[in-house]
Structure formats: structure tokens, C-alpha cells
Amino acid sequence: MFGLLAGQLLGPGVAWASVLAAAAAANLLNAFIQPATHTSVGASTAVFATLGLLAAYAWRRRRDQGDRWAYRWAPLIAGVILLGFTGAGGERTDVLAHLTASRWIARRRRTRRVAGATRPLAQVVAGAAAVAALVLAWTLALSGT
């Protein structure tokens, strides 16, 4: 659901490439932070990277409008509440990875829209890069490399 919303805001290619990059960065950072005995698959990290992307996008759009602070900060507050509600349950839930994904993408959103995000070529290139990265990752994983 979060991915479909992100696709509507940024376009499908840019949204999925952003989600993949944020989730990969969050899982990599999580691998360095956690002890060597920690195991994590990381698919849910992509869900929370998307949540962070949506919250950051909405916050950046409202930030310069000069409205009350509560209106401006509502997207980030809602993102944190959703993270707590959906991403912090269960003893095997990797809360640190979820938090890292949400924070990483929120810090990377510097513009109101990704440059060229509405251009069809940018969508195709970003989408193809995301698919290529997934195929490469699965190929390496299945080959035992």
C-alpha cells in the first residue's frame, strides 16, 4: 500500500528505486550496528523505508508553506506513529532496521520532487535500475557468492 502511494507521488520507477536504495542502505547500516549473531531478512525494512519516504515527502511539501507547526510536522509525527504501530511488534521484529530505514529516507529528501521524476525516461531508467539491482542480488544470493 505504501509503495502504491509513493508511486503516485514520485512516479513508479523513481519511487521503487528510492525504496530499494533506502532499504538496502538501512539493512547495510543495520548489519554494521547489530552483533554478528543477529539475523534479519529485511523485506519489512523496505516497507518502512517507503513509509519514511512518504512522511518525508509530505513534510517537505508543507515545510515552506508558513502554516502552524502542528500542520507542518504532522506527516513526520504520523510516520513515527505508524512506525510504532506497525513496525514494533513481536519479539523477532527488527525495530532498529525499521527505524533506520525511516530515518535514512527522511534525511535524504532534500527537494520537493526528485529532479526529473515526472519525465518518462527518468521513470524507466530508475525502474530498470531497481529491477537490475534485485536480479543481481538474487543471482548472487542463489549462487552462494
Image (cartoon, rainbow, N blue to C red):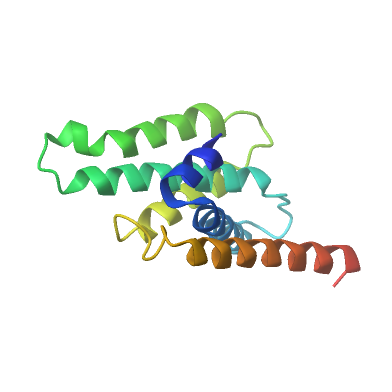
Q: Percent from the top left, x then y, of residue 99?
A: 49, 45
Q: Is residue 82 above or below residue 37?
A: above
Q: Nearer the viewer, residue 129 or 103?
A: 129
Residue 99 visible somewhere in the drawing: no
Say which quarter of the image contains residue 105.
bottom left
Q: Percent from the top left, x then y, of residue 70?
A: 19, 31
- What residue occupies the far right of the structure in this picture? 143
Say which quarter of the image contains residue 89.
top right
Q: Residue at x 60, y 63 (%)?
A: 28
Q: Is residue 20 left or right of residue 70?
A: right
Q: Is residue 74 left or right of residue 54?
A: left
| Numbered marks: total | 0
Q: Is residue 144 above or below residue 74?
A: below
Q: Residue at x 44, y 56 (%)?
A: 104
Q: Percent from the top left, x then y, of residue 73?
A: 24, 38
Q: Is residue 136 left or right of residue 45?
A: right
Q: Nearer the viewer, residue 79 or 11?
A: 11
Q: Is residue 143 above or below residue 39?
A: below
Task: Give the quadrant of the C terminus.
Answer: bottom right
- What residue occupies the far bottom of the structure in this picture? 145
Q: Nearer the viewer, residue 113 or 85?
A: 113
Q: Is residue 38 above or below residue 77?
A: below
Q: Residue at x 29, y 55 (%)?
A: 112
Residue 111 visible somewhere in the drawing: yes
Task: Give the quadrant of the N terminus.
Answer: top right
Q: Nearer the viewer, residue 120 or 7?
A: 120
Q: Is residue 28 left or right of residue 41?
A: left
